[in-house]
Each structure stands twice: as structure tokens, then as C-alpha cells.
Amino acid sequence: MRTLTKLDTDSRRARRELHDQLQGSGPLARHTVDSQSQRQAGSASFHESAQKHVTGKAAYIDDIKTPADALHVALGLSPVAHGTLTKLGLEAVRQAPGVIDVITFNDVPGHTDIGPVFPGDPIFVDREISYAGQCLFAVAATTLQAARRSVKLAKLEIDEQPASLDPVAATEREDFVRPSHVQERGDWQTALSQASHVIEGELFVGGQEHFYLEGQACIVLPSEDEGVIVHTSNQHPSETQKLVAEVLGIPFHAVTVEVRRMGGGFGGKETQASPWACMAALFARRTGKASRLRLPRSEDTRATGKRHPFHNRYQLAIDHQGVIEGGEITLIGDCGYSPDLSDAIVDRAMFHADNAYSLGNARVTGHRAKTHTASNTAFRGFGGPQGMMIIEAAMDDIARQIGEDPLTIRKRNFYRQGRNITHYGQQVDQTQLLHTLVDTLEQNSDYWSRRKAITAFNAASPIIKKGLALTPVKFGISFTAQHLNQAGALLHVYTDGSIMINHGGTEMGQGLHTKICQVVARELGLNLDSVRISATRTDKVPNTSPTAASSGADLNGMAARDAASKLRERLFDFAAEHYSEGLDREGMRLEDGMLIAGIGESERRIAWGELVQTAYLNRISLSEKGFYATPLIYYNRATGQGRPFYYYAFGAAVGEVSVDTLTGEYQVERVDILHDVGDSINPAIDMGQVEGGFIQGMGWLTSEELKWNDNGMLISDGPATYKIPTFGDLPPIFNVELLEGHPNSMASLYRSKAVGEPPFMLGICVWSALRDALSSLTGYQVSPHLDTPATPERVMLAANAIRQKAL
């Protein structure tokens, strides 16, 4: 297992061990980059921009040079959550020093609603204010300071009205941003009415701020015709192209959107990067000058949506061994003021309300509640984590009622032969892989011996209690909107043999571009250094899907592979025809920078550079486009049944915690992870995704608390009031391993599996371990209620509630 530990700065031994690992002689050696190898797909390789990242040469939006007369944009935001804008006095703003232009709702020449899927997102407030932080107007000035000072001069008159901030109350009023949806299989009512035991529970699951290091930012330059060129930190360039064109009232082809890299995205730049590009584009066209827009952190946090908070309930029928026979799960997503992506997000929460367990005859209902907050949006996992939480809570609750260890109950309820159909009708393949993975982690982490030791420790320790939990992950891979499961790529080979690849995916630090280059290198038998990737641009690969749903490498990698393989076959056909000695077309291959034909004494080798030059001189095209569409997937919303996912990725994690039950303070002592990525495209990058995903998931469930005041103003709007995990929050023992020898059963990219989102949900083990520690206060007879994030305050209150009941 790969082991990461906190280094004692006084420990030479620890430093030496880390050095050995990085040099390839320690436990990390299996995933250490060999700089002498070709580093094609299937091998570890550094991130393609790694050196640029650490030397500061990687260019982000603020690094892009613009003309000296470029304008700077600042926004006027609503100070109230709900009301009617009766007067917008901007005379003083327009007269402020340095101000060049001011725009409001009435200055938009084209569409004023920029809802990404469904209407409901006005670019500026016309009259109705729907959340604190909603944009009222924008200012362009000669300096950023002048723009930000000027917005404070606006005279606002607002008829403030009560804000709706409770999604449960909104659901009771049927105040929804989109209709509710139901997935149902079998006679769940009879299962409940005839059950040996019925168990019920509810759970509030908090939201999460994306907290990307690079905030929302863009630069828009006017082009020589009526169009614009948009540089943006953005996960969905094609959607931004569409919305900018519609706002300006010009054709799509007049807008070019470019994304080289983002300083983080996590879903927060899938739809919610577009409004700022639209605003900057308006100024660019109106003034003829480049326009910069970058939100300050506090404004970024208030003006943009988060991970959806959820209120979840379950009622399950179980037998005397704790096996689920059926039941009902209800999910209420707090969607904010508009639909945004909430329809699909609540759908995915519903799809994952089972996690790794067979629900039997069950109904899952999803509500999309409307509240007066920023419209909540995509976040790593896209609703899946919130859906999983309720069934993981149920597993712990069942265990305490039956008197068994929670791991035993989880394993009894896993999908298995004869119980492998989900509540939405999809068959779960590789069910044995789930069992194998959990059994392996159970053994490698010494779960049962640690359980015995922890039980003994808790019996002797009245204040400090330890907890242990092993939780699984089953996560479906594909966009649930079928049409998004497509991708394109454009491949150029130049006459010196070097290669440029472009595709529709975007790089936000996750290593997508690295994997795409590795795919091309593998298909053409070249060293990775021969392949370079260019910025994602809408004028190179059109109509692209967002980089989301863990599908970036799956979709774009297959498109790049398609382009490279078609070009390779064209070169094989040319070589077989052209060379006078008559190369054997059958068995021709590209390896080590050579075209190889024949075997043994008849083998002929032609250098890649020579082959390319010869093909060019003979007028053979050295450019190719590729395309891929995911097969087999479909979903019928009318019936709530289908196959929305191409395959499932699995994983499991064991978390151990120590809790001071008087103060609620706790420490994550140890984490063991075993995660399924199929046959990894790049083990080094995949390992980083697993580690980072886990830590981000742990932060969501433990420390990252969103707080609004009674008037609906977000008050946790920066690092002083919103705590993401830091290095000091890492467990001292952090064992992480990729499951090997289990390729994807589906025809995915080299039989790999997606790795962006599934590891996020491994963090659930920490929350479950906290509940385990608290349960020890009752001799493991009671399953404590613990909403998330499980801050020390919430843990302390839960411990106090348990003690009060004991009295």
C-alpha cells in the first residue's frame, strides 16, 4: 500500500524515506515516473504543465496580457435576498472618476435570460431580486480600483420582502424550480407493511463552496467583425460561446472561447462561469476595448451557487438480519432561486440513493425546492454524494438496531447475484468486484483487530472515544443527459513529426490534457514528448460537452484515439503502397518512433519522421478529426427506468477517528483506501485524484460549513469564515492503493475507469466513524443523529444529546 505520513521536521529518517519514495526505491515506486520511458497511456507521467505550475510559468486569466487601454469590470450586487428593485440610481456611478460605461438589464441587445438548460437566470435584475449577491448592474472603468469604488455610489431603493430559506417548507408549499421526479421498482408499500422491522431516519446534508484557487475570471477582446474572443476560466466553453452570442445578438461563429487551464473548477465553472463572460462581452462590443472581469473572493462566494444542501428521509423494511427488503427514500434538494442544473443533480442523487446496496422493492422521490439563495450548481459528484449519505446513515442505524457491526450489515446488503438490479432498472455488473475490493481492504486495513482494540479502548476511556468505519462507493459514470455523452478531437501531424492534439475537454488541474497526450502517443507509438496539446477553443472542436461527470478522459480520450487510429491506418495504407520493396500491410505497427513491417529477417523499419515527410511529399493528409459517442445508455424519465450509466466505478475507505466527547474536538487518525480505476491510464495522476477527492469529501462532511444570516446574506464568504481542509487536517496515517488486475468490463478507454468524482465519496467513512465513536457512549446500542458538516460543535451537541437521554 502507498503510505503518506506527516513529516516530523526533526526526523531525518522520515525525510530520507520520502526522498527514497520519490526517487523510486520506496513504496511509491510503482507509480513513480520513469523519465526515460515513452510515458504513453498506461504508465505514470508527470502532469503536462507540472513544471510550469511550480515555476510560475503556467498562464491563468490574470496572467494574460491585454492592451494598455483595457477596461476593468466591477459588479453592483443586491444587498437583500428577496424584494423588488424600485429604483436603480446610477448617475453618480456614471460620473465617477475613470468610469467608461455602465450597463443594466435594459442595455442588453439580445437575450436577457442566460439559464443554461431551463430559463430563470437573468443576466441582470430587472425588478425581482431573488438572492443576496444577485447582479444589479456592472461598471467598466480604466482601473480596477476605480470600477470597484464606483459601484458603491449607486442609489438603490428596494422593497424588501421575506426570504424563503427553508427547502423543507418550500417542498410542503410545492414551491419548486422543476417538477418532482420518482423512480420506482416493485411493490414497496407491501414490503413496508409486511416487514419484520421498519426503520426510519432523516439527515440534513450541508452544501459546499467550490473554493477554487483561481476565482471566476475572464478577458474579452472585440474582434474585427461584430464578434468577440473570450478567454475564460471555464469548464464549458461551448455553452459560454452560445450564451455570449445570444446576449450580443450575433451568430455563434462570431464568438470564439478559449480555455488553456483553470486554477480549479470542481463544477463551479460548468455553468456559472458564463454570466461574467457575457457581461465582459457586452462592454467589449459597446466600447471596442478589451474588458477584464475578475470577482473578488467574497463577491465570488456570494454571487455563485454551491453544492446543493439536501434534506433526506428514509423508511426501510428489513428482515431479522438487517437485510433491506424494500422501502422509500425521499430527497429534497435546496436548489436556490433557479433551475440551473438542479434537475439533473437531483436525478443523480436519486440514482445514488442506493450506493452499493440493493434496495429491493423501493421508491425514490426527488424534490427540487426553490429558496432565495444563489442558484446551486454542479459540484464534484453532482448530487451523488448527497444521495449516498442517506443510505450510509441507514446502514449504521440498522446495525445498531440489529446489534451487529456496521460493516457486517453493509456487506449483507451489497449488490449480489440475484439482487443486482437498481431501483431505476439498471443491472450492476462486476458485483463480485465490489465484494473483492471490500474484502481486500477489510483484510489489508486489519479492520477486525482494530475494531476489537477500539472497543476495548472505549470501554476504558470515559471521555476520549474512538470510532472506526468502512464505507463503500458505487458511482455511475456518464452524463445523465444522453446528448452530452459525445466528444470530438482534432489531430495535426507536422512535417518534422511533431504532433498537436486539440479536444473539447478543459484542464482544471486534474490531468486531462496529460492523459489525452498519452493516448495519442500510445496510438502512434511515440514518446510523450512528441505530442503537445493546445488550448481548448470553440473554433477548433465545436459543440463540446462540459468537462464534468468524471467523463473528461472517457469521452475526449476516445475521440483523440479515434483521430490517431484513423491517421495511423492512413499512413499504413500509404506505406504499403508507396515503398518499392512492398511492405506487408498485415501486422504493420508503430513502435518506439518507428513504422515496423514484417518479422524476422524480412522486418523493415522506417523512422517516424521519414514516414511523415514522405507522406507529405506524396500529398497524404496529416490531419484528422475524431469523434466518440457513449453507447448503450438511455433513460426514460416518464417511467423512471433505464440505463443511465455506461459502467460503475467502485471504491472503499476505512476511517479511524478520536473524539473528545466533552468538547467535540476530534482527530482523523488513520485512513485506508482501495479504489477501482480499471486499468489506469496514468497511475500517478489517478492516485492524486483519489487522495485529493477524499480530502475534499472529508472537508465537505466535517469542516466546510455554509452560514447565512436571517436575512439570507451568506456570511461564510472567505477563508476566515469558511474552513477547507489544510495539510494539518491530513490523517497521520494515510494508506492509498489503486486496485489492480480488474480492468473495466466495458469497452472504455484502454479498459480504464473514470477517477474524477468517485473518490470524493470515500470521505463518508470519516463521518460514519464519528457516529461510531459517539455510539460507543451507549455501548453501541444507539445510532446518534449527526447532520453534516459534522463540526466539533455538532459533535459536542450530539454527545450531549446522548448523555441527556441516558439520564
Image (cartoon, rainbow, N blue to C red):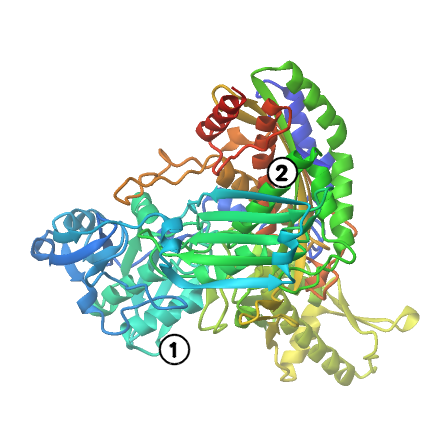
Residue depicted at x 73% and y 32%: 447
Q: Is residue 307 above or below residue 598?
A: above
Farthest residue toward the right? 601
Instruction: Check if mark 2's residue and mark 1's residue have beta carbons within 8 Å.
Output: no
Residue depicted at x 76% and y 54%: 416
Q: Position of residue 261 (x, y in %)?
A: 47, 55
Quarter of the image for residue 690 reads top right
Residue on which the image places disc 1: 253
Residue depicted at x 69% and y 73%: 565
| Viewer-nearest residue: 29 or 524 | 29
Figure label count: 2
Q: Position of residue 549 (x, y in %)?
A: 55, 59
Residue 743 seen in the figure: yes
Residue 531 seen in the figure: no
Q: Position of residue 170 (x, y in %)?
A: 36, 53
Q: Position of residue 639 (x, y in %)?
A: 57, 70
Tag on residue 396?
Answer: 2
Amino acid tagged 1: His
Q: Is residue 218 left or right of residue 37?
A: left
- Label 2 vs label 1, nearer the camera: 2
